[in-house]
Image (tube, rainbow, N blue to C red):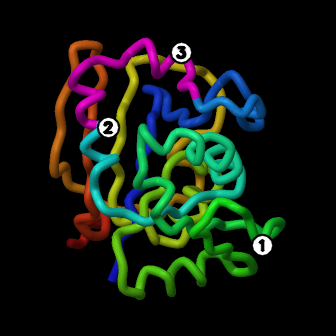
Amino acid sequence: MRKINVLEFVSLDGVIQDPREPEGDTSGSLAPPAWIASHSDAVSSATVKKQMSMPFDLLLGRRTFELWARFWPQHNDIWPAVNTATKYVASNTITSHEWQPSVFLNGDIAEKIAKLKQTEGPDLRVCGSANLVQTLMKHDLVDAFWLMIIPVTLGGGKRLFADGTIPTVFKVTESTVTSKGVIIVNYERAGAVPTGSQ
């Protein structure tokens, strides 16, 4: 059984969206927004490289997939694994793309992803894809969060935890604080939230 791991850069007030583009970055650039880039240091860079080197397949929303498809095929020297990984794309509007290998999921996305988790293969990594993440959380499909919490508040944008999130207990499996005050933390599922009667 595969696990679904959500990887996000998140502000202190829970925003995971690039504030430069309210509806998504349409510039074709994947340069990180200033609120992320200005907080990079050797520790955060090494952590990102470690994540990039682990085996994975990708589970992406359509918008994130299209942004990445414009960038990563031309930057294979930076992250070759992203081009060879299978990209599972949640979309009701596109069914094929030249960036391969790619599999497109439409219709009942949650049901199809639940079935995908039961197959053999590497864990599924979700990056960005704010709308897809909400669907995954509402259907209790997320197994772990890998978060880089940036010490800024943004005031608006798509938030990681929105209404409809299934109450769940998580345990910290790894954490560090960088010289720029970024908290890098791994959370893995640890069961249901206890009630007063437990």
Question: Where is the N terminus found, in terms of image quarters?
Answer: bottom left
Q: Could you tell me how far apart the alpha carbons at marks 2 and 3 are, in whole angstroms?
A: 17 Å
Question: Earlier along the polypeptide chain: callout 1 or callout 3?
Answer: 3
Identify the residue position indicated by label 1 in the image. Answer: 95
Image point (29%, 66%), residue name: 195
Task: Give the side of residue 187 with respect to residue 133, left or right.
Answer: left
Task: Give the side of residue 40 with respect to residue 33, left or right.
Answer: left
- Give neighbour class at mark 2: few <14, some 14-19, many 20+ (Cα, 10 Å): few
- Give neighbour class at mark 1: few <14, some 14-19, many 20+ (Cα, 10 Å): few
Callout 1, which amino acid? Thr
Closer-to-camera residue (87/91): 87
Identify the residue position indicated by label 2 in the image. Answer: 48
Q: Position of residue 102 (x, y in %)?
A: 61, 69
Tag on residue 34?
Answer: 3
Callout 2, which amino acid? Val
Q: Tell me where the magenta segment starts and ends, as one range.
A: 31-47
- Give neighbour class at mark 3: few <14, some 14-19, many 20+ (Cα, 10 Å): few
Image point (66%, 67%), residue name: 90
Image point (27%, 34%), residue name: 184
Q: CB of mark 1 within 8 Å of CB of mark 2? A: no
Closer-to-camera residue (99/46): 99
Question: Can you tell which quarter of the image residue 88 is in?
Answer: bottom right
71 w.r.t. 145: above or below: above
Question: Where is the C terminus found, in terms of image quarters?
Answer: bottom left
Closer-to-camera residue (164/79): 79
* Residue found at the very far right of the displayed protein: 93
Secondary structure at badge 1 equals loop
